[in-house]
Amino acid sequence: MERRLYAVLAHPLVRYGVGLLVLVFLLVFLALFLPALVRLAGWPPDFWVLGYGPARLAGYLGALGEAGRRLYALFLRADCLFAPLYGLWLAGWLFHLYHRPAYARAALLAALMDLGENLLLTLQLDRVDPVLAVVAGYLTFFKWVFLAYALLAFLLGLFWQRR
């Protein structure tokens, strides 16, 4: 059953259709959300590759201010839609390139970590909980680990396919 799911994700219409949605989300993030958030308080915690703790998260949320936290909450909601999309898109491509579910699972794990991170960050917009902040920081770190692995496998697969 798992291979069937990956085979559906690897279908060209799914890969390119979901890829188009991923591209639209990326453009929205790059044009609307990220410039405003970076201007207010720097890069959001989602981009802190090595993770973070409660003090750093509290500093960022404090620097955002009330209006910035509302914008960041909107960003996190959009990221909750974006994460499954990029996970499915990348999983489809990886299964298409390698025909092995193990590679595709890395993309889905990255998306799952991203969703968990978004949920924990959303819960802390008003008040930072030390335990949740540390767990969110670890989820951020492992999201980037799995995403880097999946993207590297994707790029290598494209390179090997062209040879």
Image (tube, rainbow, N blue to C red):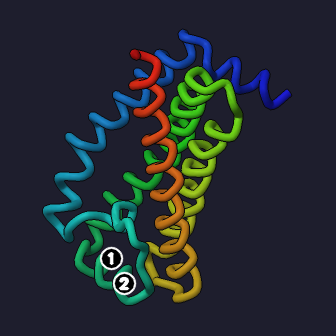
Q: Is residue 54 above or below residue 19?
A: below
The residue depicted at 52 percent of the width and 29 percent of the height is 89
Q: Quadrant of the C terminus?
A: top left
Report crowding for label 2: few under 14, some 14 to 19, many 20 or more residues within 10 A (C-alpha): some
Q: SS at mark 2?
A: helix
The picture quadrant where one finds residue 28 is top left
Q: Quadrant of the N terminus?
A: top right
Residue under label 2: 58
Which residue is farthest left?
39
108 displayed left or right of 89: right
Residue under label 1: 61
Which residue is farthest right?
1
Q: Is residue 21 above or below residue 12?
A: below
Which residue is farthest front?
163
The residue depicted at 43 percent of the width and 73 percent of the height is 51
**Contact? badges 2 and 1 (CB < 8 Å):** yes
The residue depicted at 20 percent of the width and 71 percent of the height is 41
- Could you tell me how far apart the alpha carbons at marks 2 and 1 are, in whole angstroms? 5 Å
Report crowding for label 1: few under 14, some 14 to 19, many 20 or more residues within 10 A (C-alpha): many
Q: Which three-letter amino acid code belongs to the residue tagged 1? A: Leu
Name the foreground residue: 126 vs 49.
49
Across and down, in percent, residue 7 comes to 70, 19
128 displayed left or right of 69: right
Name the foreground residue: 85 vs 39.
85
Q: Which three-letter amino acid code belongs to the residue tagged 2? A: Ala
Q: SS at mark 1?
A: helix
